[in-house]
Image: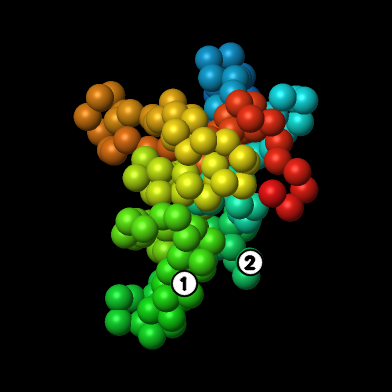
Amino acid sequence: MREIFNTAQVALRAALVTLLLTGVVYPLGMTGLANLLFPGKSRGSLLTDDTGRIVGSALIAQRFTGAAYFQPRPSAAGEAGYDAMASSGSNLGPTSKKLRERVQQELARLRRDNPESTAAIPAELVTASASGLDPHLSPAAALWQVQRVARARGVGPERVAGVVRDQIEGRELGFLGEPRINVLLLNIALDRQFGRPSPGG
């Protein structure tokens, strides 16, 4: 009986030490190290406007409906889309009638809202990403929207295109992935360059 009691004591001490090390010391140590080495990223890559107000995260797309702002990919995350608590794709396959109808609606909306853009609409502007929260667009998809944004802001398209080109992020390590633009960072840069549009813009 005493041997069983001693074994139980050893097991309990080992469990408590393991719990302390892996459940308290390690997480706190890693959190502290991350805050020290990568302070912005460890806090969610939060972005602020010129007033210092947090406007979102560089990692999560958000809805922009005003004509004066660049719009991200459509989202199937949550009922209204762009819901970080419901990150997911639509799971609709290429033969899905519902997907075809949704794409047709997006195509019609984009043509209606961007009458000056006569080039083919980039596919990513009518299809959701796997997470529904992809914050990036290709440079081509952003440049396709330039005419609408320039008209809404009352500035020349070449000036808006210049802001777009300034926001292009290159490939990781020079060879991984594709050049891309973070839509939220692009819209913040627009407001800094041209001022915030009037309500409804």
User: Residue at the location (77% across, 48% down)?
Assistant: 199
Residue 29 seen: no
The image shows residue 89, relative to residue 105, as above or below, that is above
Spot occupied by residue 176 in the image (x, y as percentages of width and height): 25, 33
The answer to which of marks 2 and 1 sits earlier in the sequence is: 2
Tell me which amino acid carries mark 1: Ala
Classify mark 2: helix, strand or loop: loop
Spot occupied by residue 113 in the image (x, y as percentages of width and height): 53, 61
The image shows residue 174, relative to residue 6, as above or below, that is above
Q: Which mark is residue 63?
A: none
The 10 Å Cα crowd at callout 2, few under 14, some 14 to 19, many 20 or more, is few
Total marks in image:
2
Nearer to us in this view, 164 or 152: 152
User: Residue at the location (38% across, 79% down)?
Assistant: 100
Q: Mark 2 highlights which residue?
A: 80
Specify the farthest residue to the left: 175
Nearer to us in this view, 58 or 160: 160
Q: Mark 1 highlights which residue?
A: 108
User: Residue at the location (34% across, 45% down)?
Assistant: 140
Left or right of 111: which side holds 8?
right
Tell me which amino acid carries mark 2: Ala
